[in-house]
Amino acid sequence: MKHHFGDCLDREGDYWTVVPNRERYAYRIDSVPAGDEEVTIATIGSDDSLWRNVFTFPNLEELTLHSPSHEQLQAIAELAVLRRLRITHARPKEITFISPLSQIEELVLEYVSGFSDLSPLRSLPRLKSLHIENLRKVTDFRGLSGLACLRYLQIDGTLDWKQPIADFEFLRGLPNLEVLSFGQIINKTPYPALLPALALKKLKRLKLTWNMLAAEEYALLEVGLHDVEGANWGPYTRFEYSPGEEWFEFTGKGAGRAKCGHANAEHKCAEYTVKYEKMKAEAERTISNSQLANQ
């Protein structure tokens, strides 16, 4: 049982209490006697011969399924008292086995790549925090719409595979979302793709790097979510990549950059600032027209 991931969960606030990835191995049940009342957290995988002991722990709250077998995935439906669940490196064709787990509050799906339908998650009325990473067959996220208690959502790809998102309409169905995080994604919808994000009236924090989307989308978010932490990129950001080497990175995918100290750097920054301000002006018109259309 190997797992090299670091802890990518935002530990601020009360969104996540699930143990960090690196600590999962401390909770393997190999030597834990059946029926142990002190066990509240457990980790099992396909190589654990005593994995069925997990059903004998009366106070179990958290479970990690690492590279689980099909039998193990289907069996967790019996653990109706679970509050926290993490599944990594699995290829189920569907995830309906999650539906009976109505007490789940925190859910992590990492490298769960065999299914495409997220709608079984709607059966989790208490779900407040969801981390999705590298779901190879998922492009349609409409199955998340309707998760009324969801307060934290993170959707990630990886450096070698970016998570495609067909559209962002599902955000309109997340009325209590407070933290929205995107990492290594590909947007499949033309501008204004992120307009649905403006419906997130309770959003407090947005986590999104400056070079993942078209520049116009950043301008739209900056105008529409100006009071949200993390939604004010500006036309460019100054980065130090190594001692003595700094660059101005222009906001937007493929927008370019200018090396600090170069003769043309100041001119390029001023030129892009004008361009970005025009995008923001267009974003204001887009938002206004959308509001009028919805009246």
Image: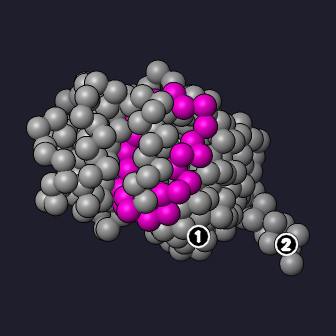
Q: Amino acid at mark 1?
A: Ala
Q: Quadrant of the C terminus?
A: bottom right
Residue that protrudes farthest toward the top in the picture? 160
Q: Quadrant of the N terminus?
A: top left
Closer to the camera in the image, 90 or 251: 90
Q: Which residues are magenta?
A: 81-106
Image location (x, y in percent) of residue 193: 72, 49
Q: Which residue is mark 1?
A: 148
Relative to residue 284, is residue 277 depicted above or below?
above
- Residue depicted at x 38% and y 62%: 81
Element assignment for label 2:
loop
- Residue depicted at x 57% and y 28%: 114
Mark-to-mark CA distance, 1 and 2: 22 Å
Relative to residue 183, is residue 105 depicted above or below?
below
Q: Which residue is mark 2?
A: 294
Res. 13 image quadrant: bottom left
User: Dot 1 surroundings within 10 Å: few (below 14), some, or many (20 or more)?
Assistant: some
Image location (x, y in percent) of residue 203: 52, 68
Image location (x, y in percent) of residue 24: 22, 41
Res. 223 image quadrant: bottom right
Which is more N-terminal, label 2 or label 1? 1
Closer to the camera in the image, 291 or 162: 162
Q: Could you tell me if residue 241 is visible in this image?
A: no
Relative placement, left or right, of 4 versus 209 is left
Image location (x, y in percent) of residue 91: 51, 28
- Residue depicted at x 37% and y 45%: 86
> Which is in the foreground here, disc 1 or disc 2?
1
Relative placement, left or right, of 74 versus 52 is right
